[in-house]
Amino acid sequence: MGLSAAYPRACPAGPGGESPSGLLKPTRGLSDHPSVEKPARAGALTRPGAAQFLPIAIAIGLMLLDTTVVLTSPALARSVAPISIILAWLDVVIVAYLLGMWPGVLAAIVTVGFDAAILQAAHANSGNNAGMIFVILVVQVVVAAVIGRLRELALRVRDQDGALKYRDRRFRALTEHAGDLIVVIDEQGHPTFASASHLAVLGYDPDEIVAGRFTNAIDNSSRRRIATLVARTLRGEGDSEKTEIRVRHADGGTRAIEVTVRNRIDDDAVHGIVLCGRDVTDRKRAEESLANQALLDPLTGLPNRKHLRAQIDEELAIALHTGHPLSVLFIDLDRFKDVNDALGHHWGDALLCEVAGRLKTKVRDEDLVARLGGDEFSVLLPAHGVAEATAVAERIVKALVTPYRIAGQTLVIGASIGIAVSSDGADASTLLRQADIAMYVAKRNRSGFSVFSVVDDEDAQRRLTNATSLHDAIANDRLLLCYQPQLGLRTGAITCVEALVRWDHPERGLLEPEAFLPIAEEIGMMPPLTEWVLRTALRQHKRWRNFGIEARLSINLSGYDFRDTRLPNTITRLLALHDVAPSQLCLEVSESTLARESDHAAELFGRLTALGVRLSIDDFGTGYSSPAALKYYPIDELKIDRSFIAGMLDDPHDAAIVAASIELGHKLGLDIVAEGVENEATWTAICKLGADLAQGNFIVEPIPDGEIEAWLREASTRLVPALALTAAAR
């Protein structure tokens, strides 16, 4: 038996006829492939045709003619009797061979009568021939049975051989058209079989692999992993184990192959180790892209805040041993908002990229330039004290005030830089906070840059004033909420409304959460702030229901809320107070917060799920949580970060990440929200990709508290149906 015919035994079928690896999964119509010819059924092989009956008819005819002659001429009977008996025997043999054992036995019984008649005519005076006739009968029956049995065995062997050849042809058709790779090696590691799919997937002819000319295409690390896995399999320590290797394609590129190893040494038909490989290069690229996005700013390509914090901690550990301090610069662009307002966000983004390029030219190779978000950047300067950091800040300020040429216009912006130098006990959060404080001092003094000082009275007063003002705003209900609806892409209904907190500061104007939430966390005001948002939003939700508006309410939680053990009780009390069903409340947690507060997440999510509220991961794709979080936490919804949505039309990587996130979420049974839909083209794209909900300024900008009810009442007859029809049409 050839190895290709035996190989299906190497991957035995699982339930439903599917092989364990899924490599040999049968498909309808496969047996109809031109290269696969089905064997004839056993019944078809044994059915006698005209060609089979012809010798039987001739033999019987000759026997009858001979018997007639003998019976009419007794004198002739004695001379031809042996021939007559031989013809009778021949008839029995032919019938048994062509029709089988039982027809042969029947023919033996019938022909013995002719034999008796011939003997009686030939030996009319010899007395009773009964004994001889009985012997002839027994011998003819035995001969018929033996010949018939041999015929059946021959037909069975013929059928099995045909089935075996069919399996061989079918397996070859499978392996030739399968996208997966199959290799069989012996106990010494020498390949004995390779599927034809190697040519399509890796560009190598299977004969090259069997000949051993493929080894150099696998790097040393991958060879060691396979050797280790094969050794474990041979020792019986595991079967069907997987590993991932890197293989050089014939065109010079590298492919990622996921390999499953199975021990089939004891299978006489295979006698080897079966390696089943699958090309996972595209999947790995998507995963690597997601991982890179977790550490890089998608706009400028610079390291992001997470990367910066990790690098600061690493350099602090080095500074502890060397005694050389490090410095952190916090850079905020001046008048950047004017550029966005005058030219639009597209050209604002172009300016940010120009700034990133200039920053990299003013630092050493070992320094790290990062974008923190918005118009904020940071520079990490290892082994730099105050004097060196001040010199770098001066160079950066001069570089950034040099005019830019954007959209055919000359633009001039400035920068304010805060400098923090490491000291005993400092960590990344402390240095960034100190540099941020120094930056505000520089901005206020218009000095270009400032070094953080703990004795800075103005800074201390600012922090105290802000903390006091925020406490007063929370206690006296001086914060405000804006609402941004989420539109169901299949129904056209407003299914959810996100509450967004704002602080109308008496001196600094309307502040986004990023401007005051750190202050609230620092002075311990997050619990009352979160309760204020919940109470105000749930009271608004109750008014909506009175107007017949049915939409869930979505509220954001901060990292501080994860450590507030009273939060679930607060939510229960406020839901009951405003008569809101728990299922109508969705709590959003950013992916970065989930990763940072993983120690508290399981307990909090368990208690919140028990209440019946929905849970959503916000800014999905930009945080640093493990994908396992989607499996182990009771999540109901994913909100894809607006940076991917904004870039998906121009960047194929962003588009791939959005598509992969939607597919992943749906496979896990989660609702997918596309956040940051700013134009019709993006709207059309997310509709085609199958997102469930959309949120962004293309639908409506955040709506103040006093206007949301009127907008929701009008939306059902104005904006929403038009968008829903557009989504349905696409």
Image: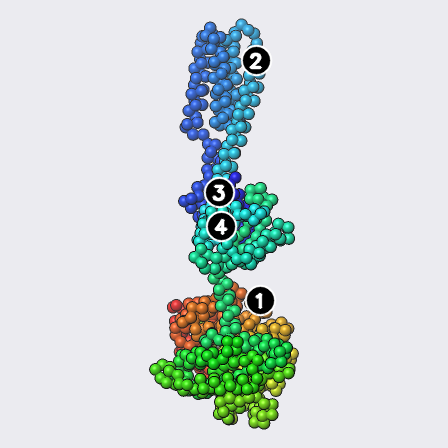
Q: Are marks 1 and 2 in contact (CB under 8 Å)?
A: no
- Residue 16 lies left or right of residue 404; in this view the side is right
- Give the Cα distance between marks 1 and 4: 40 Å
Is label 1 in a helix, a strand or a loop?
Answer: loop
Vertical order, 438 against 147 (above or below): below
- Give the Cα distance between marks 1 and 2: 89 Å
Q: Nearer the viewer's eye, disc 1 or disc 2?
A: 1
- Residue 619 lies left or right of residue 597; in this view the side is left
Residue assigned mark 1: 628
Q: Is tag 3's residue or tag 2's residue first in the polypeptide sequence?
A: 2
Residue assigned mark 2: 132
The type of residue carrying mark 1 is Ala
Q: Could you tell me residue 557's position as x and y percent?
A: 57, 79
Is label 3 in a helix, a strand or a loop?
Answer: helix
Q: Is residue 631 visible in the rendered structure shown here?
A: yes
Q: Is tag 1's residue or tag 4's residue first in the polypeptide sequence?
A: 4
Q: Could you tell me residue 276's position as x and y percent?
A: 53, 52
Is label 4 in a helix, a strand or a loop?
Answer: loop
Q: Are marks 1 and 4 in contact (CB under 8 Å)?
A: no
**Mark carried by residue 168:** 3
